[in-house]
Amino acid sequence: MTKPVLTSSGKPRLTTSAMIASIAGEGQRTKPAPFGHALVAAAKERPEIVGLTADLGKYTDLHIFAQAYPDRFYQMGMAEQVMFGAASGLAAEGFTPFATTYAVFASRRAYDFIHQTIAEEDRNVKIVCALPGLTSGYGPSHQATEDLALMRAIPGMTVIDPCDAHEIEQAVPAIADHRGPVYMRLLRGQVPLVLDEYGYRFEIGKAKVIRDGTDVLVISSGLLTMRTLEAAAKLAADKVSVAVLHAPTIKPLDTATILAEAGKTGRLVVVAENHTVVGGLGEAVAGLLMRNGLSPRFRQIGLPDEFLAAGALPTLHDRYGISTDAICTSLKAWLAG
């Protein structure tokens, strides 16, 4: 929910509740429930697709699938470990389960079940999780700031962090076609539309240059690609040229494209992600560069290695450096340093 309040100077200010999951700015183009609608569309062509949730159908947009295919929907209750075990069993019988919950519950509460019953058995389960990173203000119990690091560490797991509604719509049929376990972060509700303006097409394992630039190369995933594109547009007015390389597939990483772009001389290289700076895209890219003998000036934009505060998302994004203005400030400072 949003409501207008007044600042100390008497001007209106927009505040948000702690739990709001939408990260759309005021007036930004959005699309409702892209995951739910894309899954319904995919299921029309693929009768083996089934949907499972752990009492969070409404909050992962799986209720749309449940309405369209009630006989292919399984409400497992607040039992994430049981849900992933059941998803593994369904996959063993030839189904393609899409199992949804919050990212914290999958990556922390049910990690061993995903690791042992899905990944080790190479089961064709698609794990799709809402509230990734800092998209909830409810504090550490609901902030999945380390999920990418945990899922990257599982052998054989494909890990995807989509940017917007346009990419989610394309990613759903792509991961349905992909053979093997997938972990995908989910933006739900009214999801921003960004990448359609750039003619972008999602491909598993591919990073793509969304915007070129000569001063800074930002390698980003998820909502940080949206934020970085916004920052790049603002910085252009100050004659700062920012390239944006969107890397939605965290594993397997598009090593060829990243090395080619990071190898261009004269640019500061920055990795931006809605995730702790420990173990995510930033460290994956840093390790890749080091192993291949590249040593550009390198910085990270990400969440700190600490338990984060509760509060309204705009305040938290400013505080932890992942808002558009905070990204602009960081890039300017690093270029000047």
Image (cartoon, grey):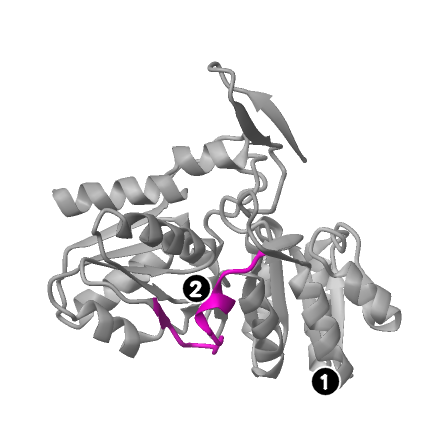
Q: Which amino acid does the dot numbered 1 rest on?
A: Gly
Residue at the location (18% across, 58% down)? 215
Residue 203's place in the image compared with 146, above or below, is: below
**What SS does tag 2 mark?**
helix
Task: Report the front residue among 207 and 108.
Answer: 207
Residue 1's place in the image compared with 271, above or below, is: above
Marks 2,1: beta carbons within 8 A: no
Q: Is residue 313 magenta?
A: no
Side (left or right) of 61 relative to 162 = right
Where residue 332 appears, as percent x and y from the top left, is 22, 43
First reached walking from the N terminus: tag 2 or tag 1? 1
Q: Which amino acid does the dot numbered 2 rest on?
A: Arg
Residue 124 figure quarter: bottom right
Label 2 belongs to which residue? 152
Local crowd size for mark 2, using a 10 Å CA cut-off: few (<14), some (14–19), many (≥20) = many
Q: How many marks?
A: 2
**What SS does tag 1 mark?**
loop
User: What is the number of the mark on residue 94?
Assistant: 1
Where residue 186 appears, as percent x and y from the top left, is 59, 58
